[in-house]
């Protein structure tokens, strides 16, 4: 996985997220990724997820997640959660993530999550709306599909 992500979100590890070993408990990394994907849509793509869901246009759910643990984050670490779209299908989006400690380039976590587009009213699978596809393609500036 290359380090050419265009988007990252920064957060600080809190006491409630560490375990008895004084490292971030593994399940919290999925929460960090969930925060990052929401910010990717809001800050990066300039899309209001709440409005898209409320008006019945678009929402997404996790279909598959894969995490590779390289190292551990610790209390008070500042983390950068990097996020990018790897692939767009008709009804799915494959996203890549990398978590690094602030000031470092070596990944703590590498992840890939496949999200499925759903109709937020019926909760049925649907095609990714053209507005969403266009925003992703524009934001990723031609990098999409070349990874």
Image (cartoon, helix red, strand yellow):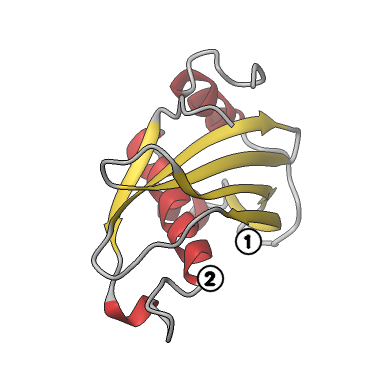
- Relative horizontal placement of residue 141, taking residue 39 as reference (left or right): right
Q: Give the residue at x 52% y 28%.
A: 136
Q: What element carries label 2?
A: loop
Where is residue 23? Give x, y as percent.
40, 72
Where is residue 91? Give x, y as percent.
74, 40
> 70 or 93, which lies in front?
70
Q: What element carries label 1?
A: loop
34 shown above or below 98: below
Residue 46 appearing in the image = no
Q: Which residue lies furthest to the top in this view?
A: 142
- Mark 1 or mark 2, earlier in chain: 2
Quickly name the residue at label 2. Answer: 26
Alpha carbon separation for disc pair 1 and 2? 32 Å
Quickly name the residue at label 1. Answer: 121
- Relative horizontal placement of residue 11, taking residue 23 as reference (left or right): left
99 shown above or below 84: below
């Amino acid at each position: 996985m290359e380090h050419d992500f265009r988007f990252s979100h920064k957060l600080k590890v809190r006491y409630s997220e560490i375990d008895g070993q004084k490292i971030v408990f593994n399940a919290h990394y999925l929460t960090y990724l969930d925060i990052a994907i929401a910010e990717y849509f809001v800050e990066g793509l300039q899309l209001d997820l709440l409005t898209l869901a409320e008006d019945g246009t678009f929402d997404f759910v996790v279909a598959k997640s894969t995490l590779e643990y390289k190292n551990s984050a610790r209390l008070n670490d500042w983390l950068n959660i990097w996020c990018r779209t790897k692939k767009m299908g008709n009804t799915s989006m494959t996203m890549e993530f990398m978590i690094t400690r602030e000031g470092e380039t070596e990944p703590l976590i590498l992840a890939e999550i496949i999200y499925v587009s759903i109709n937020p009213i019926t909760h049925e699978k649907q095609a990714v709306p053209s507005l969403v596809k266009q925003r992703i393609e524009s934001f990723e500036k031609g990098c999409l599909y070349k990874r």
